[in-house]
Structure formats: structure tokens, C-alpha cells
Image (cartoon, rainbow, N blue to C red):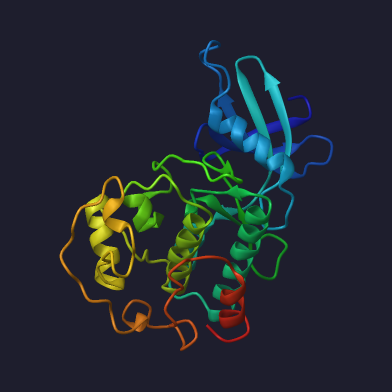
């Protein structure tokens, strides 16, 4: 740690405490994630090893940079680029409606970083405003970066079973809420769609459920209750249970009044990737 100086505490990460710091030689700002190794027999947490491994290979303007890893007595320190705040704090600072150009810019950056991760066979699996870092210092517009890869996973062929205990509740897709363990990058696309709605709706979450049942009910009240006819195999999911029948809303303007016609188009059922979204949204006004 001779190269770095630890300053004030920023917050808590998935598996460690995050501090602001500086590089002693240059005085450049950095973020230091301190992972305490209290039990030597347990070793380094798997989430920390996963994040280190993935971020060593992911290099993109919209993915947070891991500069260094330092092992010292009783702790492991991950040295990251420094960002001013996360998207949740950005919402709090704005305190109201976010202009359409900023909405478009933030979503373009989120999807660019996500497309890069998916192209490199990485699912993030925990997208939420608190895991999207924002840089405002020295930039005319907010710069967004994907962060906290502690739950991320590499994927490939053949398709593998994964844990259903991923993604913070409000950003978790219905199939995973029903216990699905076979999933793909669509898990991130659902989360990105929820975040898009939140950015466009002045930082108000789309589906702020209190528990799994409440989360599913909130989703179905907007998108309609699915059946095996429109979603083949849904009743076979491990934790499936029937819900009351709800008709889908007639217009997304009921949820997000500020959206224009293109932003109000219904989402693709398969939640695949980013090209169609780019064509619809980023060439028009939000």
C-alpha cells in the first residue's frame, strides 16, 4: 500500500468497505475496496476473486477500471478508478426530472458497457442504480460505468445452471423470481429496462416490491399476468405459483408520462440485445 493513501470512507460494497484514496506520486483520485481476511482458512471471498478475474479482462469506457490488487497483512485491497457518485445518489442530487438528452446518454452508456460484457461472455447479474457509477468531474455530461462485478459470471456453451439468488429484487426478471436457474444475458436486459424506466421517471423505481410475491404482482399489473399460452413453460418453473389475472396497461405513459412515442413502444418478449433499442431510442427524442 506504499503507493496509495487511504482517505475517507465512501460506502460498503458486496464484500468489502470502499474508501476514497490517492496515488501518492500523482495525487490522482482512486477508490480502494478493502476486503478483510478475518479467517485465514476461508481465504479470499469467492465474489472478490470473481470480480478480480473478470475485471482484469474487461476494458471498456463504460466498465469501471481495476488498476491494481494489493495483498497486505489480513486484507486484500482492490484499487479502482474513482467516480464521484453512483446513479442512485445522482438521482438524489438532481431531485427531479432528468432531461431527455441525459436520459438518452446514460442509457446509451449503460447498454454500450453491457453489450461489451455480453460480447465477452460475462453476465453482470446485479444491475441496479447503486452499481452504476457516475463521473461528473471534468465532463460536460455524466459518464456512466458498470461496477460491482461480485455476482457476475462468465458464460458459454453448453448452457449451465446458475443460482436464482441474483439481482436485487426490484430489478429481477419474472422467470428468476419464479426460481429459474437456466438463464442468459436477458437477465441483464430486464434490469437495464427497469433502470431505463427509473432514469426516465425522475429516479422513481418501476417495480419497488416488498417481497417476491409483491414484486411479481407489480410486474403483472403492468405487463399482464402470463400464461403457458403466451409464455410456454412458465408453469413448470421451480417456484411457480398462479397469480390473479391482470390485463396489461394500455400505455406506458401511465407509468412514465415524459416518454415520447418511441420510448412508449412495448419491449421485446425475449429481451435479447441492444441493436433494436439503439435504433428506436438513440436516433430520436426520449
Residue at the outermost top position: 41
Whether residue 135 is visible: no
Residue name at image x 36 percent, y 83 percent: 253
| Residue beneath the point at 51% across and 56% down | 188
Q: Tell me: 218 left or right of 283.
A: left
- Residue 112 pos. (x, y %): 65, 64
Left or right, 147 with respect to 230, comes to right
Question: Picture quarter containing residue 278?
Answer: bottom right
Q: Which quadrant would residue 103 be assigned to in this image?
A: bottom right
Q: Residue at x 58, y 31 (%)?
A: 48
Q: Position of residue 147 (x, y in %)?
A: 59, 48
Closer to the camera in the image, 33 or 255: 255
- The residue lying toward the viewer, choosing from 259 and 248, is 248
Taking 286 as reference, is 38 above or below it?
A: above
Quadrant of the image containing the N terminus:
top right
Most extreme residue toward the bottom is 261
Question: For this rendering, which residue is in front, 241 or 143?
Answer: 241
Q: Is residue 74 in view?
A: yes
At a point 64% along the width and 59% down the height, the residue shown is 113
- Which quadrant of the view contains residue 119? bottom right
Q: Position of residue 282 (x, y in %)?
A: 61, 79
Residue at the extreme right of the image, as rendered: 25
**Up/down of 278 relative to 149, above or below:** below
Left of 174 or right of it: where is 279?
Answer: right
Q: Does 57 sit above or below residue 138?
A: above
Q: Is residue 220 above or below residue 75?
A: below
Amino acid at each position: 500500500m506504499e503507493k496509495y493513501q487511504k482517505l475517507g470512507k465512501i460506502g460498503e460494497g458486496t464484500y468489502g468497505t470502499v474508501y476514497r484514496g490517492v496515488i501518492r506520486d500523482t495525487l490522482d483520485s482512486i477508490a480502494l475496496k478493502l476486503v478483510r481476511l478475518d479467517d485465514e482458512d476461508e481465504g479470499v471471498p469467492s465474489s472478490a476473486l470473481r470480480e478480480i478475474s473478470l475485471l482484469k479482462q474487461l476494458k471498456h469506457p463504460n466498465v469501471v477500471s481495476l488498476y491494481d490488487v494489493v495483498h497486505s497483512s489480513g486484507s486484500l485491497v482492490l484499487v479502482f478508478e474513482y467516480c464521484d457518485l453512483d446513479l442512485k445518489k445522482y438521482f438524489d442530487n438532481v431531485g427531479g426530472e432528468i432531461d431527455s438528452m441525459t436520459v438518452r446518454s446514460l442509457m446509451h452508456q449503460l447498454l454500450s458497457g453491457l453489450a461489451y460484457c455480453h460480447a465477452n461472455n460475462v453476465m453482470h447479474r446485479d444491475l441496479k442504480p447503486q452499481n452504476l457509477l457516475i463521473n461528473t468531474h471534468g465532463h460536460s455530461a455524466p459518464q456512466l460505468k458498470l461496477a460491482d462485478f461480485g455476482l457476475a459470471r462468465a458464460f458459454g456453451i453448453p448452457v449451465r445452471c446458475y443460482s436464482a439468488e441474483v439481482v436485487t429484487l426490484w430489478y429481477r426478471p419474472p422467470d428468476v423470481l419464479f426460481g429459474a436457474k437456466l438463464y442468459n444475458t436477458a437477465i441483464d436486459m430486464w434490469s437495464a429496462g427497469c433502470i431505463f424506466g427509473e432514469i426516465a421517471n425522475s429516479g422513481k423505481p418501476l417495480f419497488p416490491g416488498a417481497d417476491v410475491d409483491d414484486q411479481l404482482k407489480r410486474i403483472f399489473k403492468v405487463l399482464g399476468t402470463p400464461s403457458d399460452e403466451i409464455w410456454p413453460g412458465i408453469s413448470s418453473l421451480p417456484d411457480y405459483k398462479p397469480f390473479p389475472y391482470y390485463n396489461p396497461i394500455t400505455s406506458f405513459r401511465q407509468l412514465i408520462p415524459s416518454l415520447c412515442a418511441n420510448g412508449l413502444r412495448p419491449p421485446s418478449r425475449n429481451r435479447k440485445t441492444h441493436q433494436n433499442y439503439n435504433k428506436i431510442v438513440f436516433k430520436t427524442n426520449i
